[in-house]
Image (spheres, coloured by chain):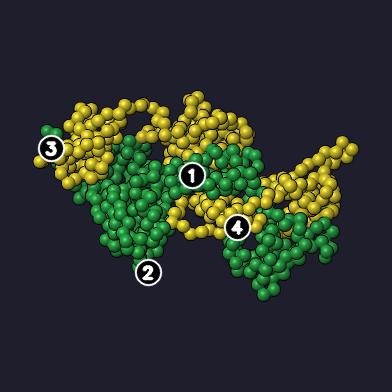
């Protein structure tokens, strides 16, 4: 569907409510390069009231990069919000309302009310049909968030299920990110000497230290657009075969490749930084899964299973 | 879209907004540059398509049929077109800015940024204030946009679906009530026509594309339905809560200890009491801990662990 017309119908009101706005800044706002914006301005210049006498046409100038627009009163107001647009914002706002950070936020309630009013009937109702669940606030969340706000270092004990170990860490927190309904603390980990994402529900103990957070220059936030888990090329490639009862593996973990083998079975290829969590996965799967490659891993699984069975007999 | 068409449409919008009285198609033909002055059929087709395009982007075109006139008259009523005046306080603007960033990818992300652009254009302050919290919700599933549209338009959907842990893929026809995201996974809640009952579908198990069938408005969503509760509810067996007795090696199984009801230290083994409902889920977990943990009681959970461990022998 065309998006040039909606853009122009927002551009004209924007320019009218921001006289003298600069070309580069307007282009950026509308997601255009400067040439595209100028193109839009030239198009608008050709339009106006019926009759199209000079007095009817919209007057646009952009001398010295400053945009002035006149004679466009008819379209001085933007088009009202559509159903999708209102819903997208309302669903997100309702998600915020679930979070402890916003519990009882009066401002949030006001925004929702203003938006529902601006939307008109129907639009607000539709937004009730999309819901995002958020995990219950982990115990550590309040402390962690306080440290981010105050710019203080954290000392914490963190549980890694794959290795079944709890490690002490000192972290300079950057932000708390809520991804896929879970809270993550992103910060510079002094133990790893790198940026890390910690699941806040796996932080067993946490204290705010009386040390200002001072992450090194290379501490950059991660782009979580593709999810939180980051396999790297150097991680080992592992191949598993699963029966229908094991299909959840490719749904639950980030995997490199999935091949359908028929009858609901799959061959799954994934990367693993260390083998121990795969051993655990294989034990959990039982006969729903089998390690194909590497052989060293398959042997480790058999050994672990035998050792565990020895406890029962 | 061609530049000429965009110009014509923009002029059409201005024309219909500026008129106090409805205009006939003929009047519009002469008032708006770009319509064929001679070929009637070409003009009518083009005008029809133009009206539909405007309606598709949400512009309300009022059609008036005057009993005294042969032809209907068209106009856009400014009050029906315009974004109402909205003023946001600084704290409200910050929250809205946060909400606008939530969606990653696809339909709703575009819709959210489109909304913010309109608000900015309307003079609403929407600068994002950097805060300690960021929210991201993804809609990676390829079927999400179609399902969202069907939910919005209240249309029935049909798709191929593989049930959990099953071999077979079956065609399902569903009256969609809504979509829910939980732990990053999207679920469709609706009335399954084939089974004549409420069902929850995981979008990642939809095979191929989703088709919307039938007319909009055909689906009736039950009043006061709690979508999230539907996703949480297992439409299957209900397990009673029981307590398992588990031996764990000292110094190991930190996660288990954290969730246990009681932990009693011992010489060779520590003893843990853990509440559970589904013995198979428990078995999967305890099996994964290998020789560091063993289930003592109850017998069905113990047997389930042994089964898994035997099954894992490669």
Identify the residue position indicated by label 4 in the image: B125
**Residue B168 quadrant:** top left
Q: Is residue B119 above or below residue B270?
A: below
Query: What's the colour of chain A in the image?
Result: green
Q: Residues within 10 Å of mark 1 (few under 14, many from 20)?
A: few
Identify the residue position indicated by label 2 in the image: A217
Chain letter, yellow: B
* Residue sitting at the far left: B267
Identify the residue position indicated by label 1 in the image: A104
Mark 3 vs mark 2, CA separation in Å: 52 Å
For marks 3 and 1, the one nearer the N-term is 1
Q: Provide residue A37's location: percent of width, then percent of height.
A: 64, 65
Mark 1 vs mark 2, CA separation in Å: 37 Å
Identify the residue position indicated by label 3 in the image: A310
Q: Is residue A243 visible?
A: yes
Same chain for marks 1 and 2? Answer: yes
> Are the two marked residues, 3 and 1, in contact with CB atoms closer than 8 angstroms?
no
Query: Nearer the observer, disc 4 or disc 1?
Result: 1
Question: Which chain is disc 3 placed on?
Answer: A
Q: Provide residue B238's location: percent of width, then percent of height.
A: 35, 26
């Amino acid at each position: 569907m065309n998006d040039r017309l909606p853009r122009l119908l927002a551009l004209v009101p924007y320019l009218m409510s921001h006289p003298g706005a600069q070309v580069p800044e307007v282009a950026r706002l509308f997601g255009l390069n400067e040439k595209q914006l100028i193109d839009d301005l030239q198009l608008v210049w050709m339009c106006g009231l019926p009759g199209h006498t000079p007095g009817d046409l919209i007057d646009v100038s952009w001398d010295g990069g400053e945009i002035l627009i006149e004679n466009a009163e008819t379209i001085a107001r933007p088009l009202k919000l559509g159903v999708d647009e209102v819903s997208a914002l309302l669903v997100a706002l309702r998600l915020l309302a679930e979070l402890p950070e916003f519990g009882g936020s009066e401002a949030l309630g006001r925004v929702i009310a203003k938006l529902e009013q601006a939307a008109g009937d129907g639009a607000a109702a539709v937004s009730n049909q999309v819901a995002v669940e958020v995990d219950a606030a982990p115990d550590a969340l309040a402390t962690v968030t306080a440290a981010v706000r105050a710019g203080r270092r954290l000392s914490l004990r963190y549980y890694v299920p794959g290795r079944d170990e709890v490690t002490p860490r000192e972290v300079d927190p950057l932000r708390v990110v809520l991804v896929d309904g879970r809270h993550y603390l992103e910060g510079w980990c002094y133990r790893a000497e790198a940026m890390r994402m910690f699941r806040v529900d796996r932080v067993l103990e946490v204290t705010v230290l009386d040390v200002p957070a001072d992450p090194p220059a290379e501490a950059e936030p991660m782009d979580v657009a593709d999810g939180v888990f980051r396999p790297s090329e150097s991680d080992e490639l592992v191949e598993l075969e699963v029966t229908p009862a094991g299909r959840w593996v490719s749904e639950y973990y980030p995997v490199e490749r999935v091949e359908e083998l028929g009858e609901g079975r799959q061959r799954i290829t994934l990367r693993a930084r260390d083998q121990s969590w795969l051993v655990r996965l294989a034990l959990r799967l039982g006969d729903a899964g089998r390690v194909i490659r590497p052989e060293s891993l398959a042997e480790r699984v058999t050994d672990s299973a035998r050792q565990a069975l020895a406890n029962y007999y | 879209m061609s530049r000429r068409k965009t110009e014509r449409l923009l002029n059409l919008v201005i024309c219909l907004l500026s008129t106090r009285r409805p205009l006939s198609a003929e009047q519009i033909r002469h008032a708006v540059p770009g319509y064929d002055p001679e070929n009637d059929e070409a003009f009518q087709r083009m005008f029809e398509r133009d009206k539909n395009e405007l309606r598709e982007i949400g512009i309300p075109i009022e059609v008036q049929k005057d009993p005294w006139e042969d032809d209907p008259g068209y106009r856009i009523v400014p009050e029906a077109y315009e974004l109402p005046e909205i003023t946001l306080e600084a704290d409200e603007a910050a929250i809205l800015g946060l909400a606008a960033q939530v969606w990653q990818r696809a339909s709703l992300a575009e819709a959210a940024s489109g909304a913010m652009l309109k608000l900015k254009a309307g003079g609403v302050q929407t600068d994002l204030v950097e805060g300690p919290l960021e929210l991201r919700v993804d809609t990676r599933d390829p079927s999400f946009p179609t399902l969202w549209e069907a939910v919005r338009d209240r249309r029935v959907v049909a798709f191929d679906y593989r049930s959990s842990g099953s071999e077979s893929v079956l065609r399902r026809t569903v009256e969609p009530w809504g979509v829910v995201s939980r732990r990053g996974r999207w679920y469709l809640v609706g009335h399954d026509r084939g089974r004549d009952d409420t069902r929850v579908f995981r979008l990642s198990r939809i095979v191929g594309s989703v088709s919307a069938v039938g007319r909009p408005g055909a689906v009736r969503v039950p009043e006061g339905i709690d979508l999230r509760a539907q996703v949480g509810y297992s439409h299957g067996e209900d397990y009673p809560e029981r307590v398992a007795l588990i031996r764990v090696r000292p110094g190991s199984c930190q996660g288990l200890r954290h969730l246990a009801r009681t932990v009693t230290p011992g010489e060779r083994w520590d003893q843990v009491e853990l509440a559970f409902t589904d013995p198979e889920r428990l078995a999967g977990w305890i099996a994964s801990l290998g020789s560091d943990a063993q289930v003592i009681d109850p017998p069905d959970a113990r047997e389930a662990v042994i089964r898994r461990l035997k099954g894992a022998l490669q």
